[in-house]
Image (tube, rainbow, N blue to C red):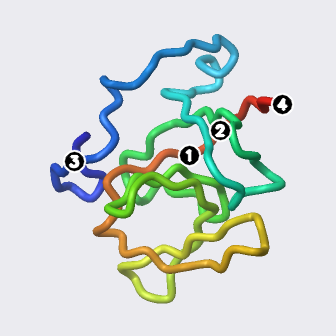
């Protein structure tokens, strides 16, 4: 995909993803769904949950404190984000207290998507 930071680089290619349409989530503004792995966002999201996402096209549209899917140079991740201590960083938080927050340079972000809903898979 075209880089969120304005640079074209390899990342998650939406055209190669499996398709699933959930009408209620489409009406809510979801552009794609992604399945979570791991437990860093537990108890908010569990391993295997499906997250409905809407892409963020401009940095000024970031809603601090909300959960995002971040496609970065380190791979995709789901984190709650806050402003970083430096202008070029964001701070990534896990909801699971066993995972420490970390800074991520904005230039490492390929794309960013706000999580607007979820489907729990039991």
| Residue 13, percent from left and from top | 30, 34
- Residue 91 drawn above or below residue 31: below
Question: Dot 2: what SS?
Answer: strand
- Labels 2, 3: front one: 3
| Residue 61, percent from left and from top | 48, 53
- Report the Cα–Cα distance between label 4 and label 1: 23 Å
- Report the Cα–Cα distance between label 1 and label 2: 6 Å
| Residue 80, percent from left and from top | 63, 62
Q: Using the rendered view, name the quadrant where residue 116 is placed.
A: top right
Q: Residue at x 64, y 70 (%)?
A: 93
Residue 97 marker: none
Q: Which residue is mark 2?
A: 116
Residue at the extreme left: 8
Decide: few, some or many residues near mark 1? Use Cα within 10 Å; few <14, some 14-19, many ≥20.
many
Q: Name the image quarter holding the N terminus.
A: top left
42 displayed left or right of 11:
right
Decide: few, some or many residues near mark 2? Use Cα within 10 Å; few <14, some 14-19, many ≥20.
some
For the residues labelled 4 and 1, say whether their Cβ atoms are less than 8 Å apart: no
| Residue 55, percent from left and from top | 45, 40
Q: Which residue is mark 3?
A: 10
- Residue 22 drawn above or below residue 75: above
Q: Which residue is mark 4?
A: 122
Decide: few, some or many residues near mark 3? Use Cα within 10 Å; few <14, some 14-19, many ≥20.
few
Mark 4 or mark 2, earlier in chain: 2
Q: Residue at x 79, y 51 (%)?
A: 44
Mark 4 or mark 1, earlier in chain: 1
Q: Which residue is mark 1?
A: 114
- Labels 1, 3: front one: 3
34 displayed left or right of 24:
left
For the residues labelled 4 and 3, say whether their Cβ atoms are less than 8 Å apart: no
Mark 4 or mark 3, earlier in chain: 3
């Amino acid at each position: 995909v075209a880089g969120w930071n304005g640079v074209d680089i390899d990342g998650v290619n939406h055209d190669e993803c499996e398709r699933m349409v959930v009408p209620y989530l489409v009406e809510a503004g979801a552009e794609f769904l992604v399945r979570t792995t791991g437990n860093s966002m537990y108890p908010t999201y569990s391993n295997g949950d499906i997250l409905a996402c809407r892409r963020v096209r401009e940095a000024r549209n970031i809603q601090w404190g909300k959960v995002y899917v971040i496609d970065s140079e380190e791979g995709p991740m789901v984190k709650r984000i806050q402003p970083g201590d430096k202008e070029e960083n964001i701070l990534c938080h896990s909801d699971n207290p066993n995972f420490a927050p970390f800074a991520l340079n904005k230039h490492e972000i390929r794309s960013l998507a706000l999580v607007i809903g979820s489907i729990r898979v039991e």
